[in-house]
Image: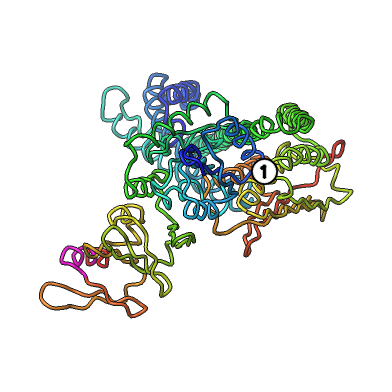
Amino acid sequence: MHPILAQLRRLALYLLAWIPITVLVAYLLAMPHTIRWQEAAIVAAPLCLIYAFFCLSAWYSCRVTPIETSSLPRLVLTHLTTALLAAGLWVLVAKTLVIELSQTSLAPQLDKRFAPEMPLLVGTGVLLYLLSIAFHYVLIAVEASRLAEARMMKASLLARDAELKALKAQVNPHFLFNSLNSISALTSSDAAKAREMCVLLGDFLRRTLGLGEKSAIPLGEEMSLIHAFLAVEKIRFGARIQMQENIAKDALDVQVPPLLLQPLVENAVVHGIANLVEGGWIRLDARCENGDLAIVVENTYDPEAPARRKSGVGLANVRQRLAARYGNRATFGVQTEADHFRVSVTLPAEREGASA
Amino acid sequence: MSQEAERRIRAIVVDDEELARQILREYLSKHREIELIGECANGFEAVKSVAEKKPDLVFLDIQMPKLDGFEVLELIGNEAAVIFVTAYDSYAIRAFEVHAVDYLLKPISKERFEDALGRAKERLSGKIAPSAIEVSELAAAARPPAQYADRIPVRDGTRVFIVPVAKLDYAEAQDDYVALATEGKKHLKQQTIASLEAALDPARFLRIHRSYIVNLERVTKIEPYGKDSHLAVLSNGVQLPVSRAGYSRLKSYLDR
């Protein structure tokens, strides 16, 4: 739909702008003094009203020849042709109108006196149409920028939403309940250990809470959060958890979204280790390559374990956060291979102080 | 053994976390009338232990390696009263649907534990115990909504087999049991064919006869057999009877 025809208010404004043009056309027609003022006005008013609508057609030709991508010859050719066509058609209408008017008492023999004005009318028609083309290009540009702005607003809202949801979902309450149950068990058998676990749990929770407002933290900080988490889980699962870490030195100061990797490690515990009678291992690799940070979280799991609820929600969450934040500059992949489960993430290696 | 000792309630505790077992052990130690006869760290051990030691009461974690708590209950039926112990409150309705005595949330409070134990004693002394088949049926049916079984746990004495649904060729009703045919073997399970049918994905399994459910992927052809009836031939050569109603169901499936 044409943007001006789409709203009555816009159409009214547009037609209002044609009033001075109508006056100008009437003035031009009356200039040679062979035509009277009233006659010029009677001809100019309907002609300009009709041409106002003719000129709206420029929108379509502007749309098919975008100014940014079309070549200059093509632009000139397209618009000159349409302008000549429109002006020619307009003059034809003018001629019919004038012949009709000359039959009436309003403007006797107007056709004879009007004939010399025809070239002027063609020129005016072409000029007005070209103006309309310019006007439509501006209109299209304004519409496009408004659309782009709206889209960007929506995208950033979505991204923020995803982040918020992600952060809210982070600290798994069941982790808390199970840990509290372990502490409760330890209070009578090993009070010192119970106290240690309280401190570790407190440490982990404090770190997670503090991260809520930050948009990025160094990988090293995320790693110490993971260590706090695993320290608690190790008391629960004992020797069943084995952790291997290979973090490259230059990866430690890369900025990552907070709580991006912790859910992956938690996933490895809940869906991997917790289902293995003898326990298993979790391996975490991180290194920088080609300006990217490549992270792999791998763990053993039991492919025949009973299905747990909500499996995969944590992974989907991480994937969404990466997509919202980095778009296609980040990758996320999941592979299962016999009894190994592997999540691979790459994201742009941004460092504090360096340009993003 | 004295008379009193014989009257003690025999209990086992099933949880994969040592500390979780420890707290139940501690709470139970205050009760002289209860004898803790075993601890298990996973579902397989639990089924084995119930079969061998015949406990009266089982404290059962839900999320465990090998078999989850509901699968354990499905296999042990009413052989013991069950108290679920879990950190997840979302299973509570399912737990009571399968006639669990109680549902304890971690961290477990002493008061709630005592309540649960009281209920268990009532259950064990009374006549309100549900029948074995009923509990198995309910446990099999109490899966999360809109989700079909992807595996069927089967028990043979003290051993447990997991039959992945994809490997099930067909199931045959035999009185109170169903025989699950998979990879050339048959496993007997105490369950009605109707409740098994309800647990299986209808897009993959079809009741072709009063006594048969077939894995549609295995059906290679259907042959007429006598008057009004048919035979379904499976890829491994097995022939199954198809009833008239079963035939029309099978046809409408194949015509799709």
Q: Residues within 10 Å of mark 1 (few under 14, many from 20)?
A: many
The answer to whether one can see residue A149 in this image is no
- Name the quadrant of the N terminus of chain A: top left
Asked where in the image residue A127 lies, by quadrant, the reply is top right
Q: Is residue A354 above or below residue B180?
A: above
The residue sitting at the bottom extreme is B237
Q: Quadrant of residue A220?
A: top right
Q: Quadrant of residue A215?
A: top right
Q: Amino acid at mark 1?
A: Glu
A53 falls in the magenta region:
no
Total marks placed: 1
Residue A244 horizontal side relative to residue B233, left or right: right
Q: Nearer the viewer, residue B15 or B115?
A: B115
Which is more toward the observer, B134 or A31?
B134
- Using the image as rendered, state which of residue A101 and residue A79 is in the foreground: A79
- Vertical placement of B231 versus B178: above or below? below
- Determine the chain carrying the residue at label 1: A
| Residue A171 percent coordinates (x, y) | 65, 33
Q: Residue A336, position in %: x, y?
A: 62, 60
What range of the chain is rendered magenta? Answer: B242-250
Image coords of residue B106 (percent x, y): 58, 32
Q: Residue furthest top?
A: A38
**SS label for mark 1:** helix
The residue pinned by badge 1 equals A266
